[in-house]
Amino acid sequence: MSNDFEIQSYPLTVRTNRERVTAFLAANGLRLDALDYYAVVTAVGDDQILAGGGLDKDIIKCIAVSDTLRDEGISATLVSHLMSIAMSRQYEAVKVFTKPSNQKIFESLGFHLLAEAPKAVLLENGLSGWLTYERYLKSLRREGTSGLIVMNANPFTRGHHFLITQAARQVDTLFVIPVKEDRSEFSYAERKAMLEAGCRNIGNVIVCEGSDYSISAATFPTYFLKELDEAATTQMSLDLNLCAKRIASALGAKIRFVGSEPLDAMTQRYNELMHEILPFEGISVVEMARLSEGDRAISASAVRTALAEGKFSEAAPKVYPTTIPYLLAKLATIALQSELDSSPKPGLVDQIDTGAHQDMDYNLMCRSIHALHPHFVALAQLGYQEKLPTSEEMRRLGLEAEREMLLATNNVNTHKGALFAMGLVLIAAAHNYYIHGVIQEQPLRTAICRLASDFPAPKGTHGDAVRRQYNVGGALAQAAAGYPDLFADWLPYLRQLKGDTFAAHKTLLYIMTTLDDTNVLHRKGAQVASEVKEEARALLSNFSEAELIKLNQRYIKENISPGGSADILSLTFLLNAILS
């Protein structure tokens, strides 16, 4: 490319930039796809877009060059620029999906073919990438007949376990590869761990590391296809070609197992293409009937729906037992997020403002919740055994969770109280399910009491000072008593508000009317704490959002934050879901 042209970053978050790039691509027969970086080529001193290309993580997309410059070597310079940006982001290899007619162009730039379909090819350039993953897969090869299953396991259900068990009986070695992309409700790390736990007692199953070499509808770009209805078939064909020629070949797998799909049309089409494509590559396809519950196949989507609706009792029977701690942890995370998202709230951080807090905001609280989630899993797993854990075991995991929370929040105490309460409930709930196969209120409360009673009263904390000065119980005393007010009063109150748009707000106010909130006592003393109870009671008797906003504004001004009530609201959400 001559010195008459220059390449510059062109942020698509700027509306005018996005509009210009969209128009430029359309003029070249392309569509704008999901991108996190875009660069354009212009003449020096001019802003007319002559060429452009972008990145979505490690994938080059949306490259277009105007007709007048296609002989100027601009494509090579633009691709080199995008590769340099990707490498600076620590990606060791760069991929591109494009039309088959562009294959030789990219091969001339150092890319090599990974997979091909009638209307798309996948190429890669880099020192590692596929070659590194291929070496890993080859290291797993075993003698005898090998089979392969690729699954999302979002989450791992009894249906997944049934499919794996049946397939494992038909081969000497069964390789199971979880889809790696983190666009699922449960993270890749969680899904892989669920698979490993669920397959631990099946001797000939190897759970492999996932990779970026599974092409899903979420990752496959469609910008270069003329018709969007071509996209699904092209994506699936490319994925199956890559699986056959690269992944299965590296593992020495000659059989691909798949569950039947009676409902989802897209999955049905994928299964059809599997039967059409894989046998020509020397791979047999075995499609097996899925495990059913009544007249319906067990599905991970039904589990996710039940969790979103706060119905643990509907979700739990569908999953493999070792998945239970992940469900409980997910409900804890949902509960914290639901409390945070409830807006407006008096003196508390929400989606509108930071309440009476100078050191917290909505994004910080979200980071805190995200940091705590894997520790919720660990706490639930600690309880998922025959004996209740010791206070030392609980304390160790709790301190690890607290450290991660503080690391994520730059040492701001966002959820320490909620972590203690939810940790106890998660351990107790997991233990009850392990023993009884169901979670019922009285055994759950008994377990919470036993767990909390093992903890010594904290000393030297703000909560300790408040308890001594004002003669109130505090978080540990509530837990040791089995949360009597929550089970007898606050939880039934929340449940009777089902369908009410302001159920969360009203339940928070209801908790505030009776809870001795140590956060309010610490900040403002007994007189204000008493006034807070009365104000919550008055607003609840004649509730309106406008008055709630006014109360929030005053609490912000007077530095009043009912943080203890917010923690109890989260806990009430969690117990409502667990005991649904």
Image (cartoon, rainbow, N blue to C red):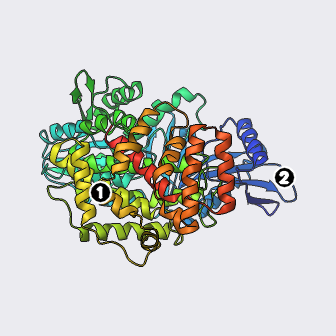
Above or below, 436 relative to 387: above
Residue situated in front as seen by the camera: 20 or 308? 308
Q: What residue type is labelled 2?
A: Asp
Residue situated in front as seen by the camera: 245 or 39? 39
Residue situated in front as seen by the camera: 510 or 287? 510
Q: Give the image quarter of residue 237.
A: top left
Q: Position of residue 297 (x, y in %)?
A: 27, 27
In the image, 33: left or right of 445? right
Q: Can residue 512 be seen in this view?
A: yes
Quarter of the figure with the C terminus:
top left
Q: Give the image quarter of residue 99.
A: top right
- Disc 1 element: loop
Above or below, 367 relative to 491: below
Above or below, 459 relative to 428: below
Please give the residue where the numbered disc 1 appears in the rendered image.
481
Q: Residue at x 35, y 64 (%)?
A: 476
- Disc 2 element: loop
Residue situated in front as seen by the camera: 387 or 267? 387
Please give the residue where the numbered disc 2 appears in the rendered image.
47
Q: Which residue is drawn at 79% across and 46% down?
A: 16
